[in-house]
Image (cartoon, coloured by chain):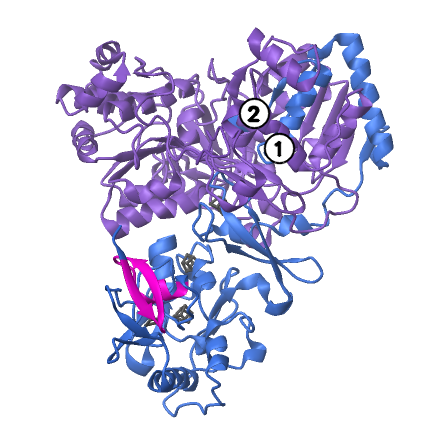
Chain colours: A purple, B blue
Amino acid sequence: MTNSIREIPLSEGFFVIGSNTTENHPVIGSMIKNEVINKGKKLIVVDPRRIELARYADFYFQIKPGTNIAILNGFMHVLIKENLYDKEYVHSRCEGFEEMAHVIEKYTPEYVAQICGLDNPEDIVEAARLMARLKPMALYYSMGITQFVSGVNGVKSTANLQMLLGNVGIPGGGVNPLRGQNNVQGACDMGALPNTYPAYQPVASIENKAKFEAAWGVSNLSTTPGLTLLEMFNHAIEGNIKAIYAMGENPVMSDPNQKHVIEALKSLEFFVVQDIFLTETAQYAHVVLPVRSFLEKEGTVTNTERRVQLMHKVLPPVGDAKDDWWVIQEVARRMGANWNYKTSEDIFEEIRKVTPSYGGVTYKRAEYEIIQWPCPSEDHPGTQFLHKDKFTRGLGLFTPIDYTPPAEDADFEYPMILTTGRILYHFHTGTMTRKSKVLDENVREGYVEVNPIDAQNYNIENGEVISISSRRGSIRIKARITNTVKPNTVFIPFHFFEACANVLTIDAVDPISKIPEYKVCACRIEKINL
Amino acid sequence: METISLIIDGKKVHGEKGQTVLEVALKNGINIPYLCYHPKISKTGACRICLVRINGVALKASCVEPISEGMEVVTEDDEIIKIRKFVLELLLSDGDHNCLYCDANGACEFQSLVQRYSIEEIKPSKTRIPKEIDYESSNALRRNENRCILCGRCVKACKEIQVSNVWSFAERGSQTHLVADDGKKIGESSCVKCGTCAQLCPTGALTLQPVKGRGANWELTAIPSICIYCGVGCKIDFYKNKDNILVKAMGNYTGPNNGHLCVKGRFGFDFVHSDKRLKKPLIKKKGSFEEAEWDEALDLIASKLIEIKEKYGPDSIAALSSAKCTNEENYLLQKFVRSVIGTNNIDHCARL
Ligand code: SF4
Ligand code: SF4
Ligand code: SF4
Ligand code: FES
């Protein structure tokens, strides 16, 4: 997030796009609801599903999955055409406006409504006018923006809109991605990415190579960016990747195209998994190492607003389970590394030295203060919101972006659109939530949401087990008949291994971020009991 | 901010314009009792237990009384004690407070005030009517309305913090009671089981479901940590008993969540005690896993990785890091992959 959770009361309005906030980030969802319901703040929601927030929205747009960019361009079209954008801000703080405005020109409300499957183009005009009046307005998004082949462009479009409105770099505004996992932010910050060292320092740079070789006392660092997760699996099948070391991931469940992942894992010469359970993925390992759960370890995590927080050991370890860092160190030592970390704090002290944005964070500060990176030195208070007065690159850059359709559209053979996501009571692959009584009892099994009209057409009853197939595979799953989804669209939460949505999803990826297009693929539903 | 100075119990203290007498007193360690007040919800001024004397005359509810320059406050005198006792006795006679049976025993704000004001046993009032007990309908919440003091915190917690508007008061006078969604059982209502109403309830009228039977409140230890689920990063006080079993999770008020939690952060941690947890390293031999010692497993991994690296080069090895692991662990794994293996093949599920 460019801005902070505690700024929510400072916003005059909220634009939530591609985030089912009340289910996936419920605490932030409640804070937004409090502003809207109890304090009369404004809310605009764009989502293919009629999510809870849609109920309280001043404007709700139930778009066809994969058409975010079109509607964002539509709002911008109105703002530019009616001269409602923040001219002062755009001219003093940004560049590239003309080029973008040129692309935006053709996104008339009528054209956009047609792409997005909306009946009422006039609402796009009214919503844009409302946005222009909300000073400041905060934009929130999540995987409903990023999990498309056009994900990176979707992200850039949200930035275009917020810059056009003058909402970046001010309290209560911002472009605020909500991170799906408790430490995605930190894992990225720490360089658990194929192309960057900690703090997003590119591995391809000779200076960075020299810097990290000096810091780590080695001379073999590679300047070739590595493979992304999905590429790793492709390369494993092709025979170029021979060994994978997995720390607490469950790609068999979480990755698109499950069959492909399993094939990849089976083709490895050596596969190591360290985890707290024998997961669906660990079944394919040659060695499985027991590690401690988050309640049995100490260390820091960084939340969606860049805030670094300290976790404590609450419980003693189970059996012979060890800290993940201890395991890595033991393997490294056996491979010749001269490492000697005694606590996670020892590691953190090293992180501070090579990660400029974490330089001023200490365990003590993380425990007692609100510290958000960048925080370069111990006397620096941390950064509540980014891009104050100027953007990181100087001027904010507008990027002209055209709408491009998803990789797969509905056709004769697969006439419906499948979209996937999470629900309130479960998390990710369900490894943890399905073993927790209260959560499990609430939702025990997977289901597919089907619109009543489709249900009628296919003669499907609520609770009936139906078959869903895509070009990748087919599953059986209970139907839940609901207006949450539009006709011709179905939704499956991906937490349930026995009705695994990722048997169906497509592994087409965004060309830059390599994010798979989980949010849309073509599918077909069929009645089983005729 | 305009600073205001005033005198509370003879002590000169400062506050900011807009603060109440109670807030300034609490901040300065002066313990005015309160029941309907809670720092995270709007003010009600209903229970009258927080009465104080202002400028030698008027008795005012300190939780709603704004401070003013030069104000003199007395937080307790004979008359105030009498009124407080009267309020407590009235509440006791209208309810059924047998602490032995109560989940809140030892962690109850009402109990602690009854102790503080040395109230002797009170007979039930003649008009008292038994109220709803529902330990079953919800797997998240337990209710015993006979312990309810009608402070209204739960109503406001659900309205202002969770914003699901489940609770409201029905009827009036001695008939007043709580209803979920216009009269449904809590388990059948629109409650999303965030548990915030129970966290804010000052008594045992609303408590969390899986707590009972896992140890008395004074046997529990609370240690703060961070939720493992979504990226909000809620700070949670984890309560465990003497046998190191997790008992409950309460939202910590200093975290980004401001004390609030969702159902996952409140009830999502049984998995740590699951008997399916891995306890020993496993090595696959002839297609099935066998338990091994750490040394054997680690030696095997190191030798295999060295062998593969020598045979096919460092880029034939890849690692998956984890968005559920700490910064330190992510850092160390990428350092391992880059400096020990010699490749940049590391990624995690940020995109998924
Ligand atoms: S548990 Fe949460 S949603 Fe349910 S009644 Fe209490 S505050 Fe409301
Ligand atoms: S249930 Fe608890 S919080 Fe709610 S009114 Fe009764 S005593 Fe107060
Ligand atoms: S308690 Fe809920 S909202 Fe908070 S971090 Fe955990 S999952 Fe996210
Ligand atoms: S605490 Fe002040 S009236 Fe209840």
Q: Which residues are magenta?
A: B4-26
- Disc 2 residue type (three-letter): Gly
Q: Position of residue A396 (x, y in %)?
A: 31, 18
Queried whether the magenta region covers residue A70, the answer comes back as: no
* Numbered mark located on residue A348 in the image: 1
Give the camera-side residue of A24 and B253. Answer: B253
The residue that mark 2 highlights is A473
Horizontal side, residue A479 vs residue A206: left or right = left
Q: Is residue B268 above or below residue B213?
A: above
Query: Is B221 in front, or is A448?
Result: B221
The image's mark for residue B132 is none
Disc 2/disc 1 C-alpha distance (Å): 44 Å
Horizontal and vertical percent position of residue A465? 52, 41
**Which amino acid, by three-letter code, is at mark 1?**
Phe
| SS under mark 2 | loop
Q: Is residue A276 above or below residue B211?
A: above
Question: Could you tell me which residue is drawn at 36 percent across and 83 percent down?
Answer: B77
The quarter holding residue A343 reads: top right
Mark 1 closeness class: few <14, some 14–19, many ≥20 residues within 10 Å: many
Q: Is residue A371 above or below residue B27?
A: above
Left or right, residue B241 beside residue A176? right
